[in-house]
Image (spheres, rainbow, N blue to C red):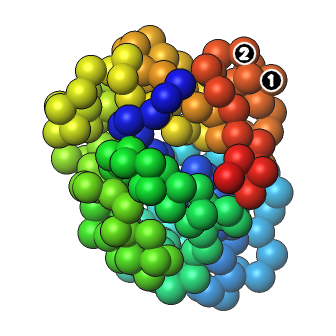
Amino acid sequence: MDKKYAIFDMDGTLIDSMAFWKNLATEYLNAKGVAEIPADILEQIKPMTMSESAALFKQEFGLTGDPEAEMNAMMDAHYRNDIPLKPGVREYLENLHRQGVRMCVASATAEHLMESCLTRLGVRQYFEFLLSCETVGAGKRSPLVYHEAARRLGAAPVEIAVYEDALYAVQTAKAAGFHVVGVYDDSAADSWQVMEQETDEIILNWEEAI
């Protein structure tokens, strides 16, 4: 595809943040003085929302306060301070920018955290706008965030490349008529073979894609 427009996911696509999310429960519980976390608890929370995990932690470990707010604050700090850019991303974006490609970010992460993280990492200037699923009121199992991004770009889905690392998001964007680029992330390794079949392009490594 001769790209003129591009919508990028952020977590797991542009930035290496998924391990921070995966380790959040352990980081939080350790900080609260829970040194030994039962394996069954860590298994239980895998499909849970943060609210559900917080309720479980209060019940199992007798925690006081607001675990959900405290875990959110921990992740906020990671976005602001230490989540890294994936190697090769800056150069890839610079190449698209030089070619005149108009770009934005559409992410489940809150817009103020996207702004802070991408500015710190030195790539915010490549994107015309940052759009959160919170803003449109639906996650990426719905195409709403992609349609709103397309509206703001002033382009039709068929003209836009969507970069995603999660299979469900790939499937949503593809069904909505976008050109979909699957980006490999270790967190989605189990679904990579299906991703390869359902995307129009794949990127295993940003440095090799430059």
Q: Is residue 128 left or right of residue 203?
A: left
Query: Looking at numbered disc 1 in the image, what kind of residue is underneath it?
Result: Gln
Packing grade of label 1 (10 A; few <14, some 14-19, many >=20) is few
Query: Looking at numbered disc 2 in the image, what kind of residue is underneath it?
Result: Gln
Residue 116 lies in quadrant:
bottom left
- Give the total of numbered labels: 2
Are the residues at dot 1 and dot 2 in contact (C-beta closer than 8 Å)?
Answer: yes
Q: Is residue 178 above or below residue 79?
A: above
Please name the residue shown 53% across and 55% down the image.
95
Residue pointed to by mark 2: 197
The x and y percentages for residue 152 are 17, 39
The x and y percentages for residue 195 are 69, 24
Who is closer to the viewer here, 175 or 66? 175
Q: Is residue 132 left or right of residue 70?
A: left
- Residue 193 visible somewhere in the drawing: yes
Please name the residue shown 62% across and 21% down the image.
199
Please name the residue shown 48% across and 22% down the image.
179
Residue pointed to by mark 1: 193
Residue 61 lies in quadrant:
bottom right
Packing grade of label 2 (10 A; few <14, some 14-19, many >=20) is few
Q: Which secondary structure, mark 2?
A: helix
Q: Is residue 68 left or right of residue 110?
A: right
Q: Is residue 128 above or below residue 145?
A: below
Q: Is residue 198 left or right of residue 164?
A: right
Tag of residue 184 = none
